[in-house]
Image (spheres, rainbow, N blue to C red):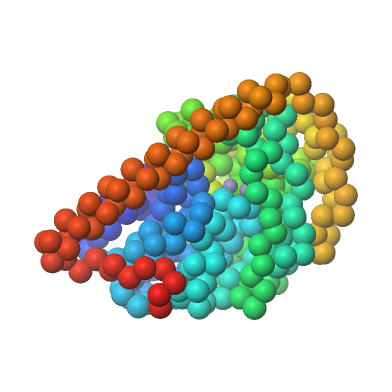
Amino acid sequence: MPHAIITEQDLSKETVAPISSPRVLRLKHLIVNSYLVGERGAGAWAVVDAGLAPFCAARIIRAAETRFGRGVKPSAIVLTHGHFDHVGAIRQLVDYWRVPVYAHALELPYLTGQSSYPPPDPTVGGGLMARMAALYPRGPIDLRGHIQALPPDGVIPGMPGWRWIHTPGHSPGHVSFFRFSDRLLIAGDAFVTVKQESLLAVLTERQEISRPPAYFTPNWAAAQRSLQSLLALEPEAVATGHGIPMAGEAMRAQLRALVLNFAHRAVPAHGRYVRRPAVADESGVVSVPPPVPDTFPRAVTTGLALAAVAGLGITILSKRAKAGASRGQKRRNQTSVPTRKAGKA
Ligand SMILES: [Zn+2]
Ligand SMILES: [Zn+2]
């Protein structure tokens, strides 16, 4: 794990906070990451992305209160984009903290009830996560009254020292966040550090600089330009929407290889958006190309999806049971871990 990025296991080891270069806490929610950016006592801090589902809220709040102190609110919740797996607990977090949410202006239609995302493409190949994509929600959600556009000057509320960069392609208003002082990049899904189309790769978390999740990427030319601009920043460490953060020259070499061989290594050989992109504007999706033939047997897809959903359900239930047992143990030990639940503020 890069030095500037920590996990929940590191929280108990923390002693002196390096205020000059606040670290980033990675929170993994089964298949997707969110991040807490800031240091205790250093003023502004922010939540980047909001997890897979409503149940992620309690975990994000608990980690935030451990890191920043009970009752200390973030300055903002900042979204790299609005796909369902990045906004799963946003409603619960907003209800709990009552803080503003920010996203790029071109992402707002999908976050204010105006437009659904283009249909995902299950024909792009790469594995079961892609194969099941037709089942993934594509919005919109409605955060009117809470969400606003990121400031046009690149400043990010709650993240002093960082700049947002428009990195469309995976979604129209996708943004990445960069801190020049230590060249730390939070790239959302502009690219990721795990082969997200493959359930096996997602479960094993094999680190590999990979294309944006292909089943949800409707504009490959824009995605390529976005990756070129991120490579030009020469990041020292990258924290992405999916996968374990990576750092150093080995990471940059993989990113360079992906950008230079984008047509072969990123753009799917077949797929709905390979020849023509989905077109979107400030009001949402304007047009999408027609679906491509899908020869994969529908019954097999449904069976695989049911098995995966059942597996995911068992994982969630066992994690909850473990968390409950550990909370019970902590209460018995009379520790001060916050136990407030989301939505009861
Ligand atoms: Zn996404
Ligand atoms: Zn994602």
Relative depth, front residue between 282 and 325: 325
Q: For the N terminus, which image quadrant?
A: top left
Q: Is 77 on the left or on the right of 227, as rendered?
A: left
Residue that appears at 56% across and 50% down: 85
Q: For the C terminus, which image quadrant?
A: bottom left
Q: Is 166 on the left or on the right of 58, as rendered?
A: right
Residue that appears at 64% across and 70% down: 143
Coordinates of residue 98 in the picture (x, y in percent): 50, 78
Q: Is 75 on the left or on the right of 334, as rendered?
A: right
Coordinates of residue 133 in the picture (x, y in percent): 65, 38
Q: Is residue 132 above or below residue 234?
A: above
Relative depth, front residue between 58 and 259: 58
Q: Quadrant of residue 267?
A: top right
Q: Is residue 22 above or below residue 288?
A: below
Q: Is 43 on the left or on the right of 183, as rendered?
A: left
Relative depth, front residue between 342 and 206: 342
Q: Quadrant of residue 331?
A: bottom left
Coordinates of residue 309 in the picture (x, y in percent): 51, 37
Q: Is residue 174 above or below residue 31?
A: below
Residue that appears at 40% across and 75% down: 344
Q: Is residue 244 visible?
A: no
Q: Is residue 317 visible?
A: yes
